[in-house]
Amino acid sequence: MHALALEIPEDVARHIHLPERRAKGMLLQELALRLFEQGIVTAAQAARLAKMQRLEFERLLAENEIALHGEPTELEGDLANLGNA
């Protein structure tokens, strides 16, 4: 799959009373949270979508009371990375 562009209708965008850059960031974060919460993307993919470091995204999950989930192999990789740190 190639990059996917989403378009916010002008009348909706007009009601988002934030600077454009901040609005884009917030919308990307919200999309990443919901896709992760539904199991559509992994935490790493969601972090990339939200343009955040993985740990930063995990903090965002915690702030939004969304449980971190993943495959056992993903957990094993995370534990191995912690051991190497």
Image: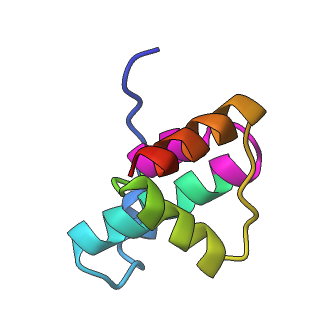
On screen, 9 above or below 39?
Answer: below
The image quadrant of residue 56 is bottom left
Residue at 33% x, 53% y is 51
Q: Looking at the picture, tell me which residue is in the foreground, 20 or 38.
A: 38
* Residue nearest the viewer, comparing 15 with 70: 70
Identify which residue is drawn at 40% across, 78% down. 16
| Residue 70 vertical placement versus 53 (above, below) | above
Drawn side of residue 10 relative to residue 75, left or right: left
Relative to 78, does residue 71 appear above or below in the rendering?
Answer: above
Residue 74 pos. (x, y %):
64, 35
Residue range in magenta is 35-48
Left or right of 2 on screen, residue 82: right
Quadrant assignment, res 72: top right
Q: Is residue 28 magenta?
A: no
Residue that extends furthest to the top in the rendered view of this protein:
1
> In the drawing, does residue 76 fall left or right of residue 43?
right
Q: Where does the image place residue 4, in percent across and percent down from the top left?
A: 41, 30
* Location of residue 34 in the rendering, given as x and y in whole percent from the top left corner: 66, 55
Q: Position of residue 43 (x, y in %)?
A: 58, 47
